[in-house]
Image (cartoon, coloured by chain):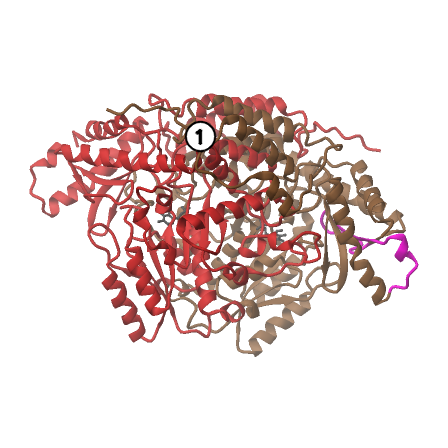
Chain colours: A brown, B red
Amino acid sequence: RRKVNTKAKFQTIPNGHDKFLTDTFQLIMKEIVQKAGDRSEKVVDWKAPEELRALMDLEPKAVGESHEKLLSRLQDIIKYSVKTGHPHFVNQLFSSLDPYGLAGQIVTDALNTSQYTYETAPVFTLMEETVLKTMRDYIGYTEGNGIFCPGGSISNIMAMNCARFKMFPQTKKYGMFGLPPLVVYTSELAHYSIKKAGYLLGFGDDNVRLVKTDTEGRIIPEDLEKQIQETKDEGLTPFMVVATAGTTVFGAFDPIEKMAEISEKHGLWYHVDGAWGGGVLMSRQHRYLMKGVERADSVTWNPHKLLGVPQQCSCFLTRHVKVLQECHRADAKYLFQKDKFYDTSYDTGDKTFQCGRKVDVLKYWLMWKAKGSEGFEQHINRLFDNTRYMVEQLNKRDDFRMVVEKPDCTNVCFWYIPPSLRNMPEGPEFWDKLHKIAPKVKEGMIRDGTMMITYQPQKDLSNFFRLVLQNSATTYEDMDFFINEIERLGKDL
Amino acid sequence: RRKVNTKAKFQTIPNGHDKFLTDTFQLIMKEIVQKAGDRSEKVVDWKAPEELRALMDLEPKAVGESHEKLLSRLQDIIKYSVKTGHPHFVNQLFSSLDPYGLAGQIVTDALNTSQYTYETAPVFTLMEETVLKTMRDYIGYTEGNGIFCPGGSISNIMAMNCARFKMFPQTKKYGMFGLPPLVVYTSELAHYSIKKAGYLLGFGDDNVRLVKTDTEGRIIPEDLEKQIQETKDEGLTPFMVVATAGTTVFGAFDPIEKMAEISEKHGLWYHVDGAWGGGVLMSRQHRYLMKGVERADSVTWNPHKLLGVPQQCSCFLTRHVKVLQECHRADAKYLFQKDKFYDTSYDTGDKTFQCGRKVDVLKYWLMWKAKGSEGFEQHINRLFDNTRYMVEQLNKRDDFRMVVEKPDCTNVCFWYIPPSLRNMPEGPEFWDKLHKIAPKVKEGMIRDGTMMITYQPQKDLSNFFRLVLQNSATTYEDMDFFINEIERLGKDL
Ligand SMILES: Cc1ncc(COP(=O)(O)O)c(C=O)c1O
Ligand SMILES: Cc1ncc(COP(=O)(O)O)c(C=O)c1O
C-alpha cells in the first residue's frame, strides 16, 4: 500500500506549512498593514509595463520553488503594487485598508467555501440574510429580497434582468426575439455598467437612452419625461428607469423622488444605482440625499465603495420578494435537491445567474459588529466633513477652479490652472491647454509616488481632477498636502 | 484645527490593530489550518437554520464591540462553518485548503485593489496576462485572449456573449429584437449555467437545446447534427455549440473533436465548458480527454475546481484576439483615458462587463510557482489514481453499484444498496426505495459530522452518491473510510 507524504508540496493541504503561512502574514503586516498610515511611504513605486515585466519573472515553470524564493517574490509583488490603503490614494471609488475588513477576509479565505446552499455555508447564509434585511431597512423597504454580487456592474445587470422578467416574464422561455424594442433610461453621466448591461442582456446600445443632466450633474426630470414620450411615439416600449445615487465622476444624486413619480406614472421598473452613494443611507445627516429611494423597485449598493469594505462587496436589493428566484431559477437537481433534510428555502443559489459564489458578507458584517452602525455613520460624516474642508481650501486659492461648486457626495472635481495659463482669456486655446495639464500632473505624482488622484474629461469639459474622499483616516493635513502637491507638480507646466 | 485620532475605530485604517489582526491570524491557524489534515475533526458541526440563528446573534447593532468579543464571534463562525479543507469533504467540485493558495489570498486581501487598469494593478495585470497566455498554451491556442471571471457561470456567460457578438455584431447596437431566434446546443447533462446564460442574454429557455447523451453521459454527436438540422427546418438560426469537458455530476467529457467538426461544418461558435475538467490539460497522462480543444472558439476553465485553487478563480479563454474587447468596450473616459502616460492597451477593463474586478490570479500564480507545472500534474495524477482505487473498492463490495462504470474524471457516482433491499427484484419498487436511501445516509453523515458526500437523481436514475475527488491529500485509507462509513450509516435503512 502506497505511503502518503502529507507534506508533499503538490498536495492541496496546509500541513507542514505553518511557517510559510506565518511568514506571509508577517510580511503583509510589516510591508502593508504597518505602513498603511505612514504618509512618508510611497503610494506606488512606478514601473512601466515592459520594465516591470523584466523585473518580475512571472512565467510559471515546470519545477516548484523554495519557500524563501516565494517569500522574496511576494515581497516584490508588494513593492510594485499600488498601496491602495495609503491615505494619499484617492484615485478611485475604493481605497483604505480596514482592519476588520481585512480580518473578515482572512477568515473567509481560510474557510474557503461557496455560498449557494445552506449545507456548504450555514453561517454565511444566515449572515447574508440578516445583513441584506438590515440594508433593506435602511432603504425603507418593508419586505423584499436581495443578494451579494461580484461588483456593482453585476448588481446592475441583475436589476435589468429582474426588470425584464417582471415586465415580460415570457422572455425567460422565449427570449427577446418576438418583442418590440424595450428601452431603458439613465443619465448621460450614469456609470458605463448600464450601457454594458444593455449590450449583455440583448437590449443594445440604441435602447439605453441617455437623459440630460444639469450643471450639478443631476438628471433633468423633464428630459426623462420627454424621452419616454418620444420612445412611445417611435413605437418602442419603455420599461426601465435607472437613477444614479452618487455618479461616478461628479458624485451627483439624481432627483430620486421625482424620478420615482415618473416611473410609477408610466409603469416602469425603477432602479436606483447607489453603487457609489448608497452608503449615505447610514448617516442620519446625509441620508436625505436618497429621499424617496424606498419607492424604487431595486437598488444597487456597494459596501466596498463609500463604506470602505474591502473588494469585492456589492449588494442588489429589491422590494419584490420573489423576483430574484423566479427570474433565475433553473432548479438544478444536483445542487438544490428538494428531499434534503433541512428547509431548502435557505439555499440561495437559484436567486442568481452565478453558481459558486464567493462569501463577501463576513468582512462587511465584522466591520459592522466592530464599529456599530454608529461607526459607519461617523465614517460617512467624516468623509463629508473632509469634503467640505477640501472645497473651502480650493476656493481660497486662485489657481484652482471647481468643476462642481458644491459636490453632493465626496467626489471633489476641480481644475488646476498653472501660472502659464493664469492670465489667458478663457477661449478654446485656454481649454485646450488646460486639457493637457491634469495628465502631466498625474504623471508627475505617479513617478514620484507621492499620491494618486485621477482625472478625466466629461461632456465638453477639459480634463479635470476628481479627488475621491473615501478613506476616513484622511485628515485636513492630507487635504492641504493634495493641494500643495498639485501646485508643486504643476507650477512650471 | 481638529485633532485626528488614528486609532478611532470607525476609521478605515489598520493603525493600532496589529494585535487584533495577529489574533485573527492565529485563530485561523489554530482552528482551521492546523486542523485541516486531522481526520478526527468534524467536517461540520451541524445546526439547523433556526437553531443556528439563535446561537449566533447576527444582527448588526448601533454600538461597536470589543476585540475580545469579535474574536469570540469569529471563533463561533469557524465552529459552525463547514470545513471544506477537511479530506472528508468530498461534496462539491471544490474543496481543499491549499497553503500557497491561502497565502496568495492573504496578500491579495492586504493589497485590496481592483483589476481594471494597469495603473491600479500593475503587477497583477502582467501576472494575469502571463498566466492566461500559459493556459492558452496548454489548450493549444497559438494566439488569443482571455480574462479572469468571478466563477465559471460568468465565464460561460462571457462565451455566449462573445459568440453572439462575433456572429451578429449589430446586436451590440440594436439588441436582439429584429433577429430570428438564435439557438444554442449543449448536453442534457450540461451545467445549468448554460441555461441561465440563455435566460440572461435574452435567448430564452426554448432556444437552449439539450442534446442527448450516452450511458457514460457524453453527448451523442448524431443527435447534435439532427437537432441542428431540425432547428434550420423550423426556420431558426443555430449559432453556438457548447461541449462540456467534465460534466458536473458524471464527470463526462463530451466528444470534443467530433463536436468541433460539426460546429465548423455549420459555422457555429464552439465553446468548451471545462470549468470542472479543464485542469486535466496539465497532466500529460490525462490531457487526451480534451483532444481537439484547440479547435474551440473559447474555453471556460476554473482553476478553483480541479486544480484546487481557492475560490474564486475562473478563466475565460478564446482564440480570437479582439472579440472580448470589441464586444464589451464602452470606452468610459473617466477610467480608460487615452492620454495616460503609459500604454493603455494594458488596461483590461474593457474586456469585460464588470468594472471593479477582484484580483483572482495571485493565489493561482503562487501555487504554480510553488509547485511548478509538475506539481499540478502530480496533483491531477493523484486524483485520478485515487479515483481508480475507489472504483476498485466499490466493485469489490456487493452493496455498492456503480452508476457510471468507468468515470472519465474524478467524480465517482454509485448507489449504496442496504441489506433490506439486497434481495429485492429491481423493479419500480426497488428504485423507489433506493431513491430514499442516499438522502438518509446524507443526513446521518452530516449529523455525525464525519464526512460530506453529495447525492442527486439524474435523468431517470434514482438518487445516487457523487463523491468528488479533488483534494490530493486524500488517501486510499480515506477511500476505505468513505465506503465503510456509508455502510455504517446505511445498513439499517
Ligand atoms: C455609479 C456606479 N455604479 C456602478 C459601478 C460599478 O461598480 P463595480 O466597480 O463594483 O462593478 C460604479 C463603479 O465605479 C459606479 O460608480
Ligand atoms: C461543468 C460546469 N460548468 C460551469 C460551472 C459553474 O462554475 P461556477 O460554480 O464557478 O460558477 C460548474 C460548476 O459546478 C460546472 O460543473
Q: On screen, B387 above or below A298? A: above
Residue B157's quadrant in the figure? bottom left
- Is A490 displayed left or right of B143 in the figure? right
> Which corner quadrant holds the C terminus of chain B?
top left
Please check the rendered image and state whether residue A280 is part of the magenta-colored stretch, yes or no. Answer: no
Identify which residue, B132 or A385, lies in the foreground.
B132
Task: Please report the residue visible at 68 percent of the width from the left and 37 percent of the height from the top.
Answer: A379
Position of residue A52 measured from the top left corner of the image (x, y, whole percent): 63, 42
Can you give x and y, in whole percent of width and height, for residue B300 in the image? Answer: 41, 51
- Would you call the spot at circle 1 few (<14 residues within 10 Å), some (14-19), or many (20 or more)? few
Residue drawn 20% across the image and 37% down it: B437
Badge 1 element? helix
**Quadrant assignment, res A54:** top right
Residue B372 appears in the rendering: yes
Mark 1: amino acid: Ala
Q: In the displayed structure, does residue B101 sit left or right of residue A335?
A: right
Query: Which stretch did the figure color magenta?
Result: A402-426
Write down the residue under mark 1: B54
- In the image as oriented, which residue stretches furthest toward the right? A423
